[in-house]
């Protein structure tokens, strides 16, 4: 049986096909860039271009038994009473929320205790507070649910992504309605909640009248579902433009200490909780490459592997969040902390990777301390699993084995949730993970 996974990331999207008769290696049917557009000082997602590319990808995929869509979190579209999009969704890197969070938190000082979501200036709750159009809209639809709606005509809100909004109660899986009311946000404008594995609709006839299932529609939820763990004593790093670093729990951690450590409690597949910290990931290196005009990363990694650690920056410093002159910002951070300033691309690359590894170590240590869950191994999934130098540096500073892969964890988790809902595979999350570990064993890095 064949399943199409639509996977939209912050810098690119793709349509992958998982053919269960040929193992667990999703193949790429179509890949496309995801380029934001700035209009009159506001940064938008080009959502219609993304939808066009999704349609092209599904056509390129050929006949499939089902479709699932995942994407980045927090962003949304607004619909009118007729279901028409009111405007291009605003990009989370836009500056409109810079001065909003304080006003929201003054109204809802217990926001973390109620929703368990770490403070990020672009959380959906803050975006909606800054969005004057939201009061006029009939519906608020998260990005993967918007694309699902355009494919099927059916509206819904998938829980793993809804949990990132800071408007959902992670203990119940339902909206934190009292919190939202104090923040002057009408959660009734979100379509009904649904969970991974629920039927989300059927595509139009010209797209084959194909079933569409809700999956872990937050891409990290799908990625963590595909971690090839053989026990529950693992930490994970979903490594890409962002790095999501944490542990998997049965219940959220809503303590004040957890809030101060900026940990988040996002829902996962099968009722799990992804207890994690967002760490700025390979974004820093990607932006450096863009400035340098260097497309291929492997020569940079090879050169950086021959260097020694010299400088460490705080990758979560807000100065690194917007696009722009990233090497200059890294150099300034090194100067301000009295460290050697990188002189060339290999030295900048080594600085970025050493800094990421240190950020991973801190996040994992905090996750263990705050949750009480011990770990024996660190799983790295996503694009960062290809980065042998980053994986080795992470093993070194954490003092734990790092198991790298699968690279296409998000697509694989998307496919397996669809396949289980469709009756093509059976078993709980542990069973699916054991199958991945058996068929797609990860690469192991021992600490040096």
Image (cartoon, helix red, strand yellow):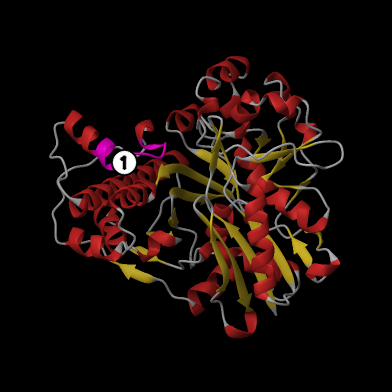
Q: Which residue is mark 1?
A: 326
Which part of the image, by quadrant, shows the C terminus? bottom left
Q: Does the stretch in magenta take in 321?
A: yes
Q: In the displayed structure, does residue 86 sit left or right of residue 432? A: right
Residue located at (53% from left, 18% from top): 102
Residue 190 percent location from the top left of the image: 76, 38
Q: Does any portion of residue 162 appear in the rendered image? A: yes
Q: In the displayed structure, does residue 99 sit left or right of residue 424? A: left
Mark 1 surroundings: few (<14), some (14-19) or many (≥20) residues within 10 A: many
Q: In the displayed structure, does residue 366 sit left or right of residue 214? A: left
Q: Does any portion of residue 428 appear in the rendered image? A: no
Tag 1 secondary structure: helix
Residue 192, by quadrant, is top right
Residue located at (70% from left, 80% from top): 1
Q: Residue furthest front?
A: 40
Residue 223 percent location from the top left of the image: 53, 59
Q: Residue furthest bottom?
A: 21
Q: Does the stretch in magenta take in 312?
A: no
316 or 393, nearer to the observer: 316
Residue 199, by quadrant, is bottom right
Compared to 336, does 263 lie above or below? below
Which range of residues does the magenta coloring cover?
A: 320-330
């Amino acid at each position: 049986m064949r399943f199409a996974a639509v996977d939209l990331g912050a810098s690119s999207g793709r349509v992958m096909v998982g053919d269960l008769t040929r193992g667990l290696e999703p193949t790429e049917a179509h890949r496309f860039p995801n380029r934001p557009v700035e209009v009159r000082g506001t940064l938008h997602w080009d959502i219609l271009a993304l939808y066009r590319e999704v349609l092209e990808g599904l056509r390129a995929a050929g006949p499939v038994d089902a479709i699932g869509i995942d994407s980045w979190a927090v962003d949304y579209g607004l619909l009118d009473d007729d279901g028409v999009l009111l405007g291009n969704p605003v990009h989370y890197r836009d500056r409109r929320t810079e001065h909003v969070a304080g006003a929201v938190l003054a109204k809802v000082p217990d926001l973390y205790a109620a929703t368990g979501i770490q403070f990020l200036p672009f959380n959906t709750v803050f975006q909606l507070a800054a969005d004057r159009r939201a009061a006029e809209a009939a519906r608020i639809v998260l990005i993967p649910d918007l694309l699902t709606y355009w494919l099927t005509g059916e509206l819904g809100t998938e829980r793993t992504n809804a949990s990132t909004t800071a408007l959902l109660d992670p203990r119940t899986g339902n909206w934190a309605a009292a919190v939202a009311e104090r923040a002057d946000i009408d959660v009734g404008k979100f379509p009904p909640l649904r969970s991974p594995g629920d039927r989300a609709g059927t595509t139009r006839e010209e797209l084959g009248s194909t079933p569409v299932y809700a999956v872990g529609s937050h891409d990290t939820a799908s990625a963590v579902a595909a971690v090839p763990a053989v026990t529950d004593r693992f930490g994970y790093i979903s490594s890409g433009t962002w790095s999501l670093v944490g542990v998997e729990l049965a219940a959220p951690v809503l303590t004040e200490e957890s809030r101060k450590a900026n940990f988040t409690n996002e829902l996962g597949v099968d009722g799990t909780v992804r207890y994690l910290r967002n760490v700025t990931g390979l974004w820093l290196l990607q932006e450096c490459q863009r400035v340098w005009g260097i497309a291929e990363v492997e020569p940079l990694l090879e050169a950086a592997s021959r260097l020694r650690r010299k400088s460490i920056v705080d990758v979560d410093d807000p100065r690194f969040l917007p696009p722009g002159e990233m090497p200059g910002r890294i150099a300034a951070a090194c100067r301000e902390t009295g460290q050697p300033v990188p002189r060339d691309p290999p030295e900048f690359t080594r600085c970025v990777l050493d800094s990421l590894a240190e950020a991973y170590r801190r996040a994992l240590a905090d996750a263990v301390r705050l949750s009480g869950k011990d770990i024996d191994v660190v799983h790295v999934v996503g694009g960062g699993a290809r980065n042998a130098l980053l994986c080795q540096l992470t093993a070194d500073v954490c003092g734990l084995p790092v198991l790298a892969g699968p690279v296409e964890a998000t697509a694989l988790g998307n496919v397996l949730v669809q396949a289980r809902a469709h009756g093509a595979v059976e078993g709980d999350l542990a069973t699916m993970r054991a199958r991945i570990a058996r068929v797609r064993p990860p690469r192991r890095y021992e600490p040096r």
